[in-house]
C-alpha cells in the first residue's frame, strides 16, 4: 500500500528560528514529490522534486529529495508568522493522470 | 483567469439527501480530481479524470459518483449522504504530461465544506 509519512505532526517555533520538516514515502512507480502550503483554504504549490540531491529554493524555503532513502526535507530559515500553516507532502506516481498520495501534514506555528 | 472554482462554498445536508458539488477550471487542463480532507487524515483522492471522457476511482470512491461534463467541468455527486461524508471537498486540476513532469503540478480550488446531519 502506498504511504507518505510526515514528521513532526506539529511544532511551535519562535520567529527567526529555522525549521526542518520531514517526509518519507513508500510508493510504487514514483514519479515526483511535491510540497504544498495550506493555510485556511486550498493548498498552494511550493516545490516539485524529481531528482535526488538537487535542492530547490524559493526565498527562505528550500527542499531536497533522496530517492535512495525515500525521503524529502523542507527547510524554512528565518521563520516569520506568515509561515504558520500546514505543510503537505505528496507523491505523484505514474499513470494516466498525476495522482497524488498525501501525507497528513505538519502543522507549523510561528510565534513572536 | 479564475483558476479552479467550486460551488457551493458551504452546504448542510440531512442524512439520505443528495447533492452535486460543481467544479470548473479555465486553465485548459487535461486532468481533474476530487479530494476530501478530514482532520488528521490529509487529503484523500475520491475520483479523478485523466482526460475528457474518462473517469477512474481513487482511494475512497464509495458513496460518490462523478461526471466529466466537458474539459472544463468535473462534478461530484453524493446520491444518499451519510454523516461519514462530512468533510471538506477540494477539486484540483493539472496539465498531466507523461514526460514533462514539471507540468504535473495540481492546482486546487477553494473547497466546499459539507456537513451531513
Image (spheres, rainbow, N blue to C red):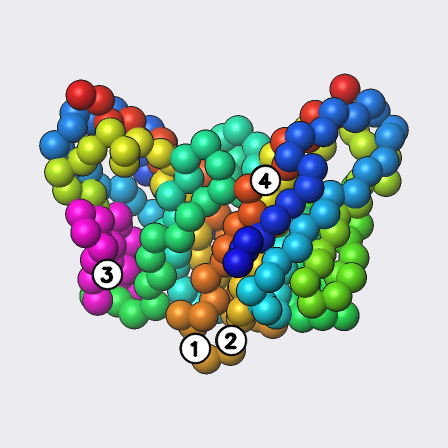
Residue B43: x, y in percent? 54, 43
Neighbourhood count class around disc 4 (C-alpha, 10 Å): few under 14, some 14–19, many 20 upward: many
Q: Between tags 1 and 4, which lies in front?
A: 4
Question: Is A86 above or below relative to B101?
Answer: above
Neighbourhood count class around disc 3 (C-alpha, 10 Å): few under 14, some 14–19, many 20 upward: some
Chain containing the residue with disc 1: B
Question: Is A66 above or below relative to B112?
Answer: below
Q: Are marks 1 and 4 in contact (CB under 8 Å)?
A: no
Q: Which residues are magenta?
A: A54-74
Q: Establish whether labels 1 and 3 are both on one chain.
A: no
3D distance between C-alphas at marks 1 and 3: 17 Å
3D distance between C-alphas at marks 1 and 4: 28 Å
**Residue indicated by mark 4:** B111
Neighbourhood count class around disc 2 (C-alpha, 10 Å): few under 14, some 14–19, many 20 upward: some
Q: Secondary structure at mark 1?
A: loop
3D distance between C-alphas at marks 2 and 1: 5 Å
* Residue that appears at 82% across and 23% down: B14
Residue B116: x, y in percent? 75, 25
Lateral position of residue B108 relative to residue A103, left or right: right
Q: Is residue A60 magenta?
A: yes
Q: Main secondary structure of the magenta part?
A: strand
Residue B26: x, y in percent? 60, 61
- What is the quadrant of residue B83 in the picture? top right
Q: Establish whether labels 4 and 3 are both on one chain.
A: no
**Residue indicated by mark 2:** B97
The answer to whether any part of residue B45 appears in the image is no
Amino acid at each position: 500500500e502506498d504511504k507518505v509519512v510526515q514528521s513532526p505532526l506539529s511544532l511551535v517555533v519562535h520567529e527567526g528560528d529555522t525549521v526542518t520538516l520531514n517526509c518519507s514515502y513508500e510508493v510504487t512507480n514514483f514519479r515526483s514529490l511535491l510540497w504544498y502550503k495550506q493555510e485556511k483554504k486550498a493548498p498552494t504549490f511550493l516545490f516539485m522534486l524529481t531528482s535526488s540531491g538537487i535542492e530547490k529554493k524559493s526565498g527562505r524555503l528550500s527542499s531536497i529529495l533522496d530517492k535512495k532513502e525515500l525521503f524529502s526535507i523542507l527547510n524554512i530559515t528565518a521563520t516569520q508568522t506568515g509561515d504558520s500553516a500546514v505543510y503537505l507532502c505528496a507523491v505523484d506516481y505514474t499513470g494516466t493522470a498525476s495522482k497524488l498520495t498525501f501525507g497528513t501534514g505538519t502543522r507549523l506555528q510561528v510565534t513572536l | 483567469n479564475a483558476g479552479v472554482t467550486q460551488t457551493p462554498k458551504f452546504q448542510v445536508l440531512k442524512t439520505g439527501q443528495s447533492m452535486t458539488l460543481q467544479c470548473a477550471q479555465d486553465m485548459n487542463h487535461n486532468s481533474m480530481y476530487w479530494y476530501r480532507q478530514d482532520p488528521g487524515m490529509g487529503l484523500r483522492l475520491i475520483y479523478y479524470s485523466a482526460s475528457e471522457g474518462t473517469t477512474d476511482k481513487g482511494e475512497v470512491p464509495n458513496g460518490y459518483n462523478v461526471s466529466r461534463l466537458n474539459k472544463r467541468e468535473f462534478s461530484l455527486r453524493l446520491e444518499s449522504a451519510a454523516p461519514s461524508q462530512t468533510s471538506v471537498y477540494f477539486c484540483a486540476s493539472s496539465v498531466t504530461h507523461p514526460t514533462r513532469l514539471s507540468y504535473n503540478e495540481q492546482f486546487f480550488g477553494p473547497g466546499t465544506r459539507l456537513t451531513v446531519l
